[in-house]
Amino acid sequence: MSSVKKDRNIQSNSGTTLPSDPSDTRLGADGFAKAISQALKKEFDGNASAIKAIVALTHANERAVKNWYEGRNGPSGESLIQLCRHSDAVLETVLLLAGRPYLVTEKKFIDARTKLSEMIAQLDELLK
């Protein structure tokens, strides 16, 4: 009896590739992972245990978080939402990747206005 070949070629090896479309602005998995990694490093780099802090926020596996942090993989949708809830840098990155820079500007304006309102409230307390 001859052995059965278990390896199958799912894709053809013809070498034919389609030319890339210059108007195609898709980021790809690597670009997404690197962008999220940069945002995480911006937000958590001052923290000596950044990976553990991110694990605590997202409840994701520590190895997965390490891969996000190092830019090897990007987070799943559920984890990305958790990151956006807790990290302004990740939220801003997602908005920029989505082509919504004006929302980043609006968010920064609202954040500044909120801080200013808090400072005014503190000054009012001191005057009492």
Image (cartoon, rainbow, N blue to C red):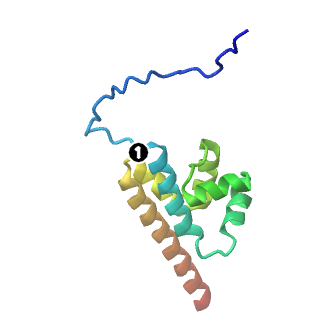
Report helix, strand or loop for mark 1: loop
- Left or right: where does residue 84 sit relative to residue 94? right
The residue at 38%/41% (across/down) is: 26
* Residue sticking out furthest to the left: 22
Q: Which sits in the foreground, 127 or 64?
A: 64
- Left or right: where does residue 60 sit relative to residue 38? right
Examine the rendered structure and indicate whether residue 13 appears above or below residue 114: above
Q: How many marks?
A: 1
* Residue sticking out furthest to the bottom: 127
Residue 78 quadrant: top right
- Percent position (x, y) of residue 53? 70, 65
| Neighbourhood count class around disc 1 (C-alpha, 10 Å): few under 14, some 14–19, many 20 upward | few
* Residue sticking out furthest to the top: 1
- Left or right: where does residue 116 sit relative to residue 24? right
Q: Amino acid at mark 1?
A: Leu
The residue at 64%/74% (across/down) is: 47
- Percent position (x, y) of residue 113? 46, 69
The residue at 57%/60% (across/down) is: 70
Q: Which sits in the foreground, 21 or 89?
A: 21
For label 1, the residue is 27
- Quarter that holds the C terminus: bottom right
- Quarter that holds the N terminus: top right
Q: Which sits in the foreground, 102 or 6?
A: 6
The residue at 74%/60% (across/down) is: 56
Residue 123 quadrant: bottom right
- Percent position (x, y) of residue 74? 56, 49
